[in-house]
Amino acid sequence: MTEHTHVDTQRTHSGSPVQAASALVGTAFLLVGVLGFIPGITTPYDGLRAAGHGSHAELLGLFQVSTLHNVVHLLFGVAGMVLARTWSAARVFLVGGGVVYLVLSLYGSVVDQQSRANVVPLDTADNWLHLVLGIGMIALGIVLARRSATTHAG
């Protein structure tokens, strides 16, 4: 009986706003990950390093990136797209991913930007972006999940 209810819940929420948001956020992360590897969009491209604060490349001349940073964006994008397949997984991606970005923002604001601990790398612009992303993803996950649950209740 429980399994049948779970299947019905997944079917009821198919194509829900929370799933669309997960797919959209995932697509945005994929795009940012790819753009991080394109010379001209990432400058100076010859400053791109594998990881760490020694990478002097900046996406759009503002956000410090490295190969690791770009790969993380790509992986987050794939996760968002895959997890958008079900309502519950999409909600977990948005809320859980939002928490990850809030923690990353906090970490970036306390770590010495010139230390080896700044492995991603992070700078002030990244910290603000991660804070906004974290809040936005959590809000989408909570608000859209409530809207879907309310719409499909009964």
Image: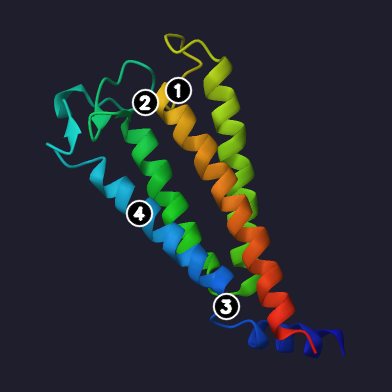
Which of pointers 1 and 2 lies earlier in the amino acid sequence? 2
**Residue on which disc 2 sits:** 51
**Looking at the rendered structure, which numbered label has been put on residue 90?**
none
Whether residues under marks 1 and 2 lie with C-beta atoms below 8 angstroms apart, the answer is: yes
Q: Is residue 121 left or right of residue 10?
A: left
Tell me the kind of residue under disc 3. Answer: Ser
Give the quarter of the image for residue 124: top left
> At 55% across and 49% down in the image, what residue appears?
136
Query: Can I make out residue 32 in this image?
Result: yes
Tell me the kind of residue under disc 2. Answer: Ala
Which of pointers 3 and 4 lies earlier in the amino acid sequence? 3
Q: Is residue 66 left or right of residue 43?
A: right
**Residue on which disc 4 sits:** 30
Q: Secondary structure at mark 2?
A: loop
| Quadrant in which the C terminus appears | bottom right
Q: Nearer the viewer, residue 65 or 102?
A: 102
Whether residues under marks 1 and 4 lie with C-beta atoms below 8 angstroms apart, the answer is: no
Select label 3 or label 1 by which is in front.
Answer: 3
Give the quarter of the image for residue 99: top right
> At 38% across and 34% down in the image, what residue appears?
68
Position in image of residue 133 (x %, y %): 51, 44
Q: Is residue 2 left or right of residue 141?
A: right
How busy is the neighbourhood of tag 1: few (under 14 within 10 Å), some, or many (20 plus)? some
**Looking at the rendered structure, which numbered label has been put on residue 16?**
3
Q: Secondary structure at mark 3?
A: loop
**Residue on which disc 1 sits:** 119
Which of pointers 4 and 2 lies earlier in the amino acid sequence? 4
